[in-house]
Amino acid sequence: MPTTFAPTTTDTVAALTNITKRYVNGVTALDNLSLTLKRGEIVALLGPNGAGKSTAVKLMMGLSSPTSGQVRIFNKDPRNTHARLRTGVMLQVGRAPEMLRVREQVNIFRGYYPAPMPYADLVKAAALEGIEERMFGQLSGGQKQRMLFALALAGDPDLIFLDEPTVGLDIEARRAMWAEIRSLAARGKTVLLTTHYLEEADALAHRIVVINKGRVICSGTPAEVKSLGSSTDAAATLKIIRCVTTLPAETLHNLIGVTAADTLNGLTTLTSAQTEATLRELLALDQSLHSLEVASPALEDAFLALTSN
Amino acid sequence: MSTTAIPMPTTTALKPPSVLRIFITEIRYEILRSLRTRAYSLAAIGFPVMFYCLFGLLLNRNEIIGSVSVAKYLLGGYAVFGSLGAAIFGIGVGVALDRSAGWLDLKHASPMPPLAYILSKCSMAVVYSFLIVCVLTALGIALGHVHITAIEFARIALIAAIGAIPFSCLGLAMAFTVPPAAAGGIANLVYLPMSFLSGLWVPLQFLPKILQQIAPVLPTYHLAQMMYAALGAPSHGTLTQHLLGLTGFSILMIGITWFAIYHREQNS
């Protein structure tokens, strides 16, 4: 369960209020968007490419200014040094200085803050053991990502922006980073993450904010967002059935309750509105059926339902 | 309850670390980084050394300009050439790459004072300018029988270091206006013609009249003239004119940089 820490305070750490961001070329990236981050919560910002996620994050980091509306970080302008002293940032960075060692880069960032996290703790939190003396240019994609994570945590900040933090990480490293992010929130830190791994948002976030075309289209716990995505009665009872079967496509389509059937690489995926009836018929027709799996529509499906028109 | 009040226990401890210390750290690691980047450090020092050996020490051996040997005269020109190269490739190309990779955004979003980043880059250019003038002088003395007094050397070293500043401003202006992928090519397009047109390779008096008249708009021209004067060779203009020329050029470049950054912030 993601909720190891339930935010109990109402302290507002960061707020975007009625933000509109229009570029000179006429594109409206954000359209009257409001978003509040509270102490101790993990918020995932989800949206398709071009939805305005990165614009929103850039505004909060003080890298860009809004056309109208207000951005406040710790009740200060995001460009204010005191706001930045309490903020840690992890961005999609293609290249850090290649000829500086991991240890050197981490310590340079620690030097920016009044009360940095002890070096040994950072090494542990970002799993940098064994690569501390390597130059950035010699690191693998996942190791680079872990160093950038350490830079975000270097100042022991109260607010952390993580832009696609687990890109390029293997499953083990990804889970380790999730655990670290959860422990940050448990210590009262606020984390805003953007991700395109819906599984990540589902597993990690206390609150998911889905944005599309510069507007917030829904916001709530992962469970709430999932149920919003399947708001119609038929959709609410839909289940996904996966199995390996020898039945032809025509037979599958004609099974009771099946709304869609698809076979790819020997694995058949059925969508059914009457799961039990479909299963009874399916198992009776194919004695050799195996690898059966039944699942509720995932956050991914809810997300697609919400962001497609 | 007010939604804007954020009582946090750590507020009192938030005194930012010393800015001076951050500056020193940034400068130290920028220099270390550039020295470790062999492709850069070898090229930045190697280019002026190669050209000086060829044109100043091998060819034109017995020529005299004014009362000064060609080997001594061109020492000044190639020191300026080296200074320009270090800044234009180190800053013009280096910052452009940092910008395109998103590294500049990450630095900017951190509490690091933005000036620390700029100063570290300029200091790197100053250090390279100094290294280059030392190497060139050593070569001139060892291989070109250049007679240079300690005072003369101190003067040209100082001029090379000062020269790194307008060139750093040029590098910054390039980094923020030129598409990062094209930065390397454009750096060469600025570096080589600018050096030639201000008489760093071939003394100005041997170039066509029209080029001689254009030369004073270039910062390299002013630095070269300062170098020649410092080395006791014939030169044009006064020190004040040259310093004004360099200051004007630097202000123009800073203006372009500021405008480009402002424009970028509005559009990103």
Image: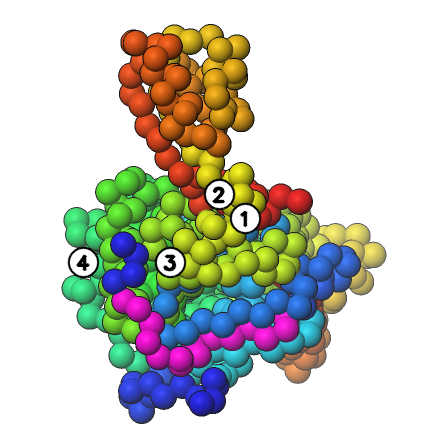
In this rendering, the answer to whether A245 lies above or below A97 is: above
For residue A298, side relative to residue B186 (left or right): left
- Estimate the x, y position of residue B81 in percent, counting from the top left: 56, 57
Q: Quadrant of the N terminus of chain B?
A: bottom left
Nearer the camera: disc 4 or disc 1: 1
In this rendering, the answer to whether A218 lies above or below B245 is: above
Nearer the camera: disc 2 or disc 3: 2
- Estimate the x, y position of residue B140 in percent, counting from the top left: 44, 56
Figure coloring: rainbow
| Upstream in sequence: badge 4 or badge 2 | 4
Q: Quadrant of the C terminus of chain B?
A: bottom right
Q: Secondary structure at mark 1?
A: loop
| Chain that bears disc 1 | A
Is residue B140 part of the magenta span, yes or no?
A: no
| Chain that bears disc 2 | A
Marks 4 & 3, CB-CB < 8 Å contact: no
| Upstream in sequence: badge 2 or badge 3 | 3
Is the same chain shared between marks 2 and 3?
yes
Query: Which label is found at residue A205?
Result: 3
* Residue type, mark 2 in image: Ala
| Upstream in sequence: badge 1 or badge 3 | 3
Magenta residues span: A5-19
In terms of depth relative to the viewer, which is nearer, A144 or A32? A32
Is residue A15 part of the magenta span, yes or no?
A: yes
Nearer the camera: disc 4 or disc 2: 2
In which quarter of the view is residue B205 placed?
bottom right
Residue receiving disc 4: A124
